[in-house]
Image (cartoon, grey):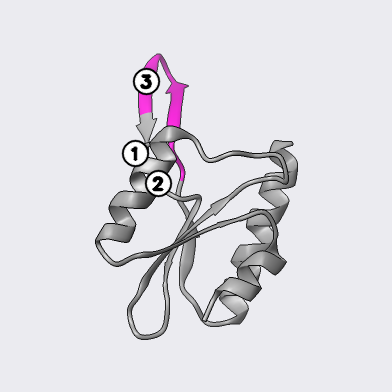
Amino acid sequence: MASDENAIKRSILEYLKYRGIPATKHQSGTIFMHGRVIELGEAGWPDIIGVLPGGAFIGIEVKTKTGKVEESQQKKIMELQNKGALIYVVHSLKELEEALP
């Protein structure tokens, strides 16, 4: 299932690049390297973050058809929306294409 989600993320990043919208993947989680614990990003942030022409911050949370938004993600989505960010939860590139201005 993760590979399906990764394929959607790749297609979205390619589409955003085509549209001239700067964006990047946001990584979070924990890795262990050389006996050390390394925290990657803050949990809950959308999978992809970027900036629309005009300066609006966008966050894109990518889910498979059966994927659900976790509590930490929902809290972060609400926090970002309250600050004026545009947040999209999508299950496909098509959904994002239809939602973006």
- Check disc 1: other Cα within 10 Å, few if <14, some if 14-19, many if 20+: few
Q: Give, as a three-letter code, the residue at label 1.
A: Glu
Residue for point 34% across, 65% down: 85
Q: Give, as a three-letter code, the residue at label 2.
A: Trp
Q: Where are the magenta residues, as a range?
A: 27-38
| Mark 1 or mark 3, whichever is nearer to me | 1
Position of 72 relative to 88 (above/below): above
Question: Which of the 4 quarters of the picture holds residue 95?
Answer: bottom right
Magenta stretch holds residue 63: no
Q: Do the numbered discs 1 and 2 sit on residues whose CB atoms are within 8 Å? A: yes
Which residue, given by chain and number where applicable, does mark 2 sit on?
45
Q: CA distance from mark 2 to mark 3?
A: 20 Å
- How far across and down, in percent of the image, does residue 84 sit? 29, 67
| Mark 2 or mark 3, whichever is nearer to me | 2
Question: Which of the 4 quarters of the picture holds residue 16?
Answer: bottom right
> Quick one: 28 or 59, which is closer to the camera?
59
Query: Magenta stretch: dominant SS?
Result: strand
Q: Give, as a three-letter code, the residue at label 3.
A: Val
- Check disc 3: other Cα within 10 Å, few if <14, some if 14-19, many if 20+: few
- Indicate left or right for 30 with 63 as reference: left
Q: Earlier in the sequence, mark 2 or mark 3?
A: 3
What mark, if any, has residue 42 been given in the picture? 1
Which residue, given by chain and number where applicable, does mark 3 sit on?
37
What mark, if any, has residue 90 been given in the picture? none
Of helix, strand and loop, which one carries label 3? Answer: strand
Q: CA distance from mark 1 to mark 3?
A: 14 Å
- How far across and down, in percent of the image, does residue 25 sit? 50, 54
Position of 33 relative to 49 (above/below): above
